[in-house]
């Protein structure tokens, strides 16, 4: 059924979708229900090697992996870190650890060892899972994080490492589908300011978000039957909530096949699309541009595509229209989703068949949104008025791990989460994101925290002060740009030298590609807080000349 229009009362916009079911079961129990329903369907398949698991094989391996963790002495509540590319074994490690009662911390596998260690030192992870080629990096992470007791790798046995394959031989008898531990995942986000934090997403947050996403009228997903199965090509990383929730967990809920791609490579991506003819595609805006530019696109590969779903950064209206034209399938609908790691992440989504290009749509099932401009008043604003977007729903995080102050800053006592995004809604309750108040920079949809780059910049002996902002970039959406004050007597240092110094310590997507500008002072307010907005205005003026 098509959703009825959003209703607003006191300028609070409610969802036009029906109320989805909410489940009190663990995510492991939920996955095992899928395994009982679709035992012989393929759950995961590597897009490169073809290595694959059925839902039933996956259930067995989850039991064995989780049981092996308990046998190794890991206790409920200890944090298990996954630092892995997208591989068919990713969900086995994830759900296995979860069944052992361990919250799972998700870390970007393209990070440097220092970046990985910084994230894991926040949550005190005690075990690591990755793939054999990452052995040296993960050993370095374990050296930097003394809490880590074991490194588990997919690959042949080696000195000082536990082999995933050996754990897969466990009898599985120590496994339970744990319900005592309420935290399912610990992905990372810098929120509205400062350094990255571990976001506590509970089993309830995650199962709610999956059910909200699948509520009729919301998306096109079809449950697997004896002769149908949804197929996703999983290029978007599972360490991000978009990948883990919208691709993995929603996919498993519907009996879909997930074709996993371990790294970002254009040729491999398009080959996987040709080979597997996905029924739904999940993209971020830079991928939309790539799809439009790719000369070898075969229309036939999109013949089964019912949905193309885009989120994580604003999708340009013209790009949307061109994309639909290029895919040339009247049955394909484009949907845009908006959310944050802190909201599991789904919370606004354009309804099926009623996508307004440029809008992220109304709140999804059981969610609410409002817009407030505190400079005007503390009252929620009516249609077409811009202010900060606030959200509420069962998918809102429990809080930041070990950081009650940052949590309090983000979630009000009555459960509203402040997004740090500037938005307005139209008279049908569709939302439009127009700007960002928070410090966060988004490069190709990935978070970059200015504070992290600033902290590294000021360790350079020639730098007295530094500030980082995001500037628009055709390909990446945004890229970081640094403003730097030199120490007295350090005039000879060049921007190339500083760029090389910082970039050697961070992963590629954080590189300061927007240039380094020397200046005599960094604009700050009287509390000493950097006025990034002033720098953004300054940059806009510079580029106008
Ligand atoms: O925390 P995060 O990295 O979270 C995300 C979440 C992405 C998705 C993807 C599919 C969905 O269905 C969904 O609901 C969410 O990226 O970054 C959060 C910030 O990213 C910007 C905004 O500034 C958030 O605060 N952002 C995310 N989605 C959009 C967006 C969008 N559709 N349009 C504009 N900005």
Image (cartoon, rainbow, N blue to C red):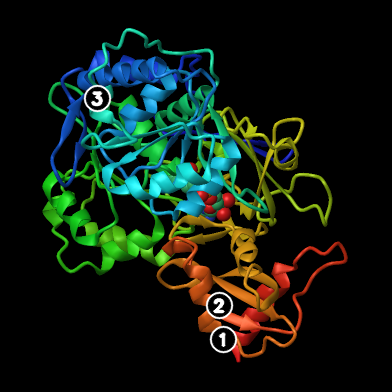
Q: CA distance from mark 3 to mark 2?
A: 46 Å
Discs 1, 2 touching: Cβ within 8 Å: yes
Circle nearer the viewer, 3 or 1:
3
Label 1: which residue? 494
Circle nearer the viewer, 3 or 2:
3
Q: CA distance from mark 1 to mark 2?
A: 7 Å
Badge 1 element: loop
Residue occupying image coordinates x 43% and y 33%: 213
Label 3: which residue? 166
Badge 3 element: helix
Residue 249 in the image, given as x and y percentages of width and height: 37, 31
358 relative to 258 in the view: left or right: right
Q: Is residue 5 visible?
A: no
Up-down relation of residue 512 to residue 398 (above or below): below
Label 2: which residue? 498
Viewer-proximal residue, 130 or 324? Answer: 130
Residue occupying image coordinates x 35% and y 49%: 136
Viewer-proximal residue, 144 or 404? Answer: 144
**Which of pointers 3 and 2 lies earlier in the amino acid sequence?**
3
Up-down relation of residue 281 to residue 533 (above or below): above
Q: Which quadrant holds residue 228?
A: top left
Neighbourhood count class around disc 3 (C-alpha, 10 Å): few under 14, some 14–19, many 20 upward: some
Residue 270 in the image, given as x and y percentages of width and height: 19, 56
**Which of pointers 3 and 1 lies earlier in the amino acid sequence?**
3
């Amino acid at each position: 059924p098509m959703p009825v229009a959003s209703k607003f009362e006191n300028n609070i916009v409610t969802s036009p979708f029906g109320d989805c079911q909410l489940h009190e079961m663990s995510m492991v129990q939920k996955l095992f229900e899928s395994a009982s329903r679709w035992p012989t369907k393929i759950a995961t398949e590597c897009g490169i090697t073809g290595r694959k698991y059925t839902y039933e094989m996956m259930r067995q391996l989850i039991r064995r992996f989780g049981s092996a963790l308990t046998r190794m002495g890991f206790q409920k509540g200890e944090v298990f870190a996954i630092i892995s590319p997208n591989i068919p074994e990713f969900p086995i490690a994830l759900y296995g650890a979860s069944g052992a009662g361990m919250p799972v911390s998700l870390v970007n596998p393209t990070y440097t060892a220092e970046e990985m260690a910084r994230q894991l030192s926040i949550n005190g992870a005690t075990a690591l899972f990755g793939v054999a080629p990452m052995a040296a990096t993960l050993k370095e992470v374990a050296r930097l994080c003394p809490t880590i007791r074991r490194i588990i790798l997919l690959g042949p046995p080696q000195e000082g490492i536990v082999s995933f394959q050996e754990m897969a031989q466990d009898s599985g008898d120590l496994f339970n589908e744990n319900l005592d531990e309420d935290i399912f995942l610990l992905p990372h986000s810098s929120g509205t300011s400062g350094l990255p934090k571990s976001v506590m997403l509970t089993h309830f947050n995650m199962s709610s978000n999956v059910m909200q996403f699948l509520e009729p009228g919301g998306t096109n997903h079809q449950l697997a039957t004896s002769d149908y199965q949804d197929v996703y090509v999983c290029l978007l990383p599972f360490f991000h909530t978009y990948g883990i929730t919208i691709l993995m967990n929603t996919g498993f809920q519907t009996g879909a096949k997930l074709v996993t791609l371990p790294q970002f490579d254009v040729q491999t991506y398009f080959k996987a699309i040709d080979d597997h003819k996905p029924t739904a595609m999940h993209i971020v805006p830079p991928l939309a541009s790539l799809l439009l530019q790719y000369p070898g696109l075969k229309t036939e590969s999109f013949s089964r595509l019912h949905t193309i779903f885009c989120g994580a950064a604003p999708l340009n209206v013209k790009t949307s229209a061109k994309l639909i034209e290029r895919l040339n399938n009247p049955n394909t609908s484009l949907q845009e989703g908006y959310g944050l790691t802190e909201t599991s992440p789904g919370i606004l989504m354009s309804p099926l068949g009623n996508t307004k290009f440029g809008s992220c749509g109304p709140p999804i099932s059981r969610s609410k949104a409002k817009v407030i401009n505190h400079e005007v008043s503390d009252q929620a604003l009516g249609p077409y008025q811009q202010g900060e977007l606030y959200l509420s729903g069962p998918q809102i995080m429990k809080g930041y791990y070990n950081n009650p102050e940052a949590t309090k800053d983000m979630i009000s006592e009555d459960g509203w989460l402040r997004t740090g995004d500037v938005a307005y809604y139209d008279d049908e309750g569709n939302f439009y994101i127009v700007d960002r108040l928070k410090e966060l920079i988004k490069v190709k949809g990935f978070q970059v925290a200015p504070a992290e780059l600033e902290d590294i910049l000021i360790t350079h002996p020639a730098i007295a002060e530094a500030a980082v902002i995001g500037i628009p970039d055709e390909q990446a959406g945004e890229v970081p740009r640094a403003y730097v004050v030199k120490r007295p007597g350090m005039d000879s240092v060049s921007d190339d030298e500083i760029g090389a110094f910082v970039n050697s310590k961070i992963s590629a997507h954080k590189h300061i590609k927007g240039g380094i500008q020397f200046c005599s002072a960094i604009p700050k307010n009287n509390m000493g807080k950097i006025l990034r907005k002033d720098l953004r205005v300054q940059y806009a003026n510079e580029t106008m000349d």
